[in-house]
């Protein structure tokens, strides 16, 4: 605990933590924006920055998750109970100071784009990938004029300089909240195309997560359900949904 605020747990200190507060409430910040106070003390992020967001809706959602975390004073909670806080913290402490670094990190996914790596067998998987992935690449080309190459097998695929330049220009136009949301969605789905579709409203988060799981679903159709794989897919979908909700709250009037 800090003298001038309280810090949320971070992934590096992941694990159960004990709830030390009774009430969480939104408070306006002098100069604009909103913070969340725990028993009257403002939250500070892992890097020491005071939590302050411009959206009242997001601040209220953050307060709500702190109000529920651990149930009551003395109860236990983990960082997974605070998704809006975690994404807001990334936006404030990592994205806002250097948006270009976030753009560069996202560009690493262009050559590894999930939708561009196709199986050459078995036939049912090939057909399923084509049916679910081709429309997304067609949308990208029609809507954003980005025509990505597709390959089969496991050899690395390097997209053209024109594709990289187009993605760089597109990402450079995005605000910090969108970049923070993409920073969650894209690694979760291994797809910058699906991430873009969600943040631009072309796909619902749940639909995008489903499209990203074609390979896993096909595997289970062949070999039967796998509890660990199902849990991994559930967590993937939760991450994408959380990031989409964060962005929606940031954009709320």
Image (spheres, rainbow, N blue to C red):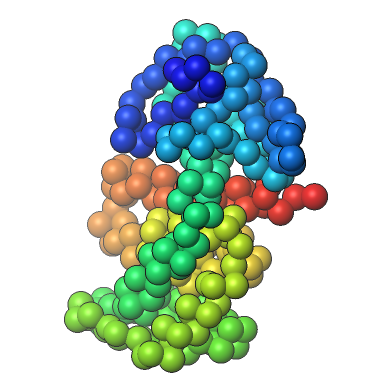
Task: Between residue 84 and residue 223, name the one nearer to us.
Answer: 84
Residue extending furthest left?
155
| Location of residue 26 with respect to 89 vertically, above or below | above
Left or right: 107 as drawn, with respect to 142: left
- In terms of image quadrants, where is residue 235? top left
- Residue placed most toward the observer, 118 or 248: 248
State the image coordinates of residue 229 (x, y, percent, origin top left): 31, 49
Instruction: Return the x and y of residue 72 as percentages of the image width and height.
Output: 55, 11
Residue 87 vertical placement versus 85 (above, below)? below
Q: Nearer the viewer, residue 236 or 230?
A: 236
Residue at left 50%, top 54%? 97
Residue 92: x and y, percent? 53, 47
Horizontal and vertical percent position of residue 142: 60, 88
Give the residue drawn at x 75%, y 50%: 252
User: In the picture, which quadrant includes the N terminus?
Assistant: top left
Picture quadrant where residue 123 is located: bottom left
Which residue in the rendered view is the most extreme toward the top? 74
Q: Is residue 155 left or right of residue 96?
A: left
Q: Which residue is at 54% across, 69% downward? A: 196
């Amino acid at each position: 605990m800090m003298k001038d605020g309280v810090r949320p747990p971070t992934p590096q200190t992941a694990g159960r933590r004990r709830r030390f507060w009774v009430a969480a409430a939104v408070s306006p910040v002098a100069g604009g924006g909103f913070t969340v106070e725990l028993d009257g003390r403002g939250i500070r992020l892992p890097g020491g920055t005071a939590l302050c967001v411009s959206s009242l809706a997001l601040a209220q959602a953050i307060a709500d998750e702190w109000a529920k975390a651990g149930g009551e004073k003395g109860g236990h909670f983990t960082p997974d109970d605070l998704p809006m806080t975690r994404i807001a913290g990334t936006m404030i402490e990592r994205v806002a100071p250097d948006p270009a670094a976030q753009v560069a990190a996202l560009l690493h996914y262009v050559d590894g784009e999930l939708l561009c790596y196709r199986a050459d067998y078995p036939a049912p998987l090939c057909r399923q990938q084509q049916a679910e992935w081709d429309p997304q690449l067609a949308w990208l080309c029609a809507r954003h004029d980005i025509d990505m190459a597709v390959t089969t097998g496991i050899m690395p695929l390097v997209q053209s300089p024109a594709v990289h330049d187009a993605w760089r220009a597109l990402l450079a136009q995005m605000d910090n909240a969108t970049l923070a949301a993409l920073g969650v969605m894209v690694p979760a789905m291994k797809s910058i195309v699906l991430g873009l579709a969600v943040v631009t409203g072309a796909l619902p988060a749940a639909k995008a997560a489903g499209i990203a799981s074609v390979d896993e679903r096909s595997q289970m159709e062949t070999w039967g359900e796998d509890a660990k794989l199902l849990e991994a897919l559930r967590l993937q979908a939760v991450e994408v949904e959380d990031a989409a909700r964060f962005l929606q709250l940031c954009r709320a009037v």
